[in-house]
Amino acid sequence: MRQADAHTLREFMMASEFTPPAALSILTPAGLVAISDDDLEGALITYVVEKALPDPNDPAAVAALPSGLRAWYLTFVVDAQVLNGGFNQLFFNPTGALVPDAPAALTSVGIPEAADLVTAALYLLGEHAPALEAAVEAGTVEAFMETYIDQPFAELDNAYGAAQETFRLARIRFVREQATAFTHP
């Protein structure tokens, strides 16, 4: 994980009304059962960022996670990025390196509708990639904001946003049903 990414996550958690649950030192089925549905994803993302992944945007590091944790993490990353700034942001940020594995993860978590949206966004990315690459190279907020002008992902962003609660509940159900596939380290 880049130091800036960890710092940004910690700043967000401190500046927002979000209060993270007690930190987990290891992931076990019993430990996951003890966490409320409201706190579950916060506890998992804190664990992944602080304990499990040296670089949360490295596909090889993510691939080394236990199967359930890996699938959940990929779906959570897609969700967080798309709901924050749309598919445009998902592809612009370093998390874009994880997206090719996301449709399979979304399907395994039980969210085929989200997998279809990500697959459609990947198709559109073929046309939009040069603009995003130029913005990354420029490295400015203004360059990034210009990538929204044509809004190639707007329809997909809206469809994803409309189903966000269904997707969240499916992720939580997956964690509950597949808790043994989360055991780490």
Image (tube, grey):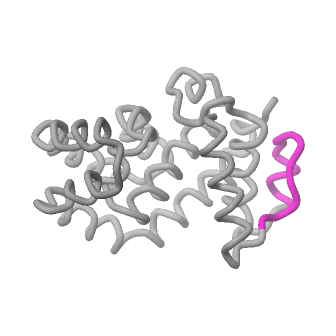
Task: Give how far across and how far down residue 86 sits, in percent.
Answer: 33, 60
- Looking at the rendered image, the quarter that the C terminus falls into is top right
Question: Residue 157 sits in which quadrant?
Answer: bottom left
Residue 30 against residue 71 in the figure, above or below: below
- Residue at 30% across, 54% down: 87
Instruction: Report the side of 35 relative to 113 (left or right).
Output: right
Q: Is residue 31 magenta?
A: yes
Task: Give how far across and how far down residue 156 sits, in percent.
Answer: 23, 61
Task: Give how far across and how far down residue 17 sits, in percent.
Answer: 70, 79
Residue 80 against residue 50 in the figure, above or below: below
Extreme residue in the bottom direction: 17
Task: Give how far across and how far down residue 49 sits, in percent.
Answer: 69, 43
Q: Is residue 25 magenta?
A: yes
- Name the chief secondary structure element in magenta: loop
Instruction: Report the side of 139 relative to 58 (left or right).
Output: left
Question: Residue 68 sits in which quadrant?
Answer: top right
Q: Which residues are magenta?
A: 20-34
Instruction: Report the side of 130 relative to 163 (left or right).
Output: left
Residue 12 against residue 69 in the figure, above or below: below
- Residue at 82% across, 46% down: 29
- Looking at the rendered image, the quarter that the N terminus falls into is top right
- Residue at 37% across, 49% down: 90
The image shows a total of numbered marks equal to 0
- Residue at 14% across, 62% down: 149
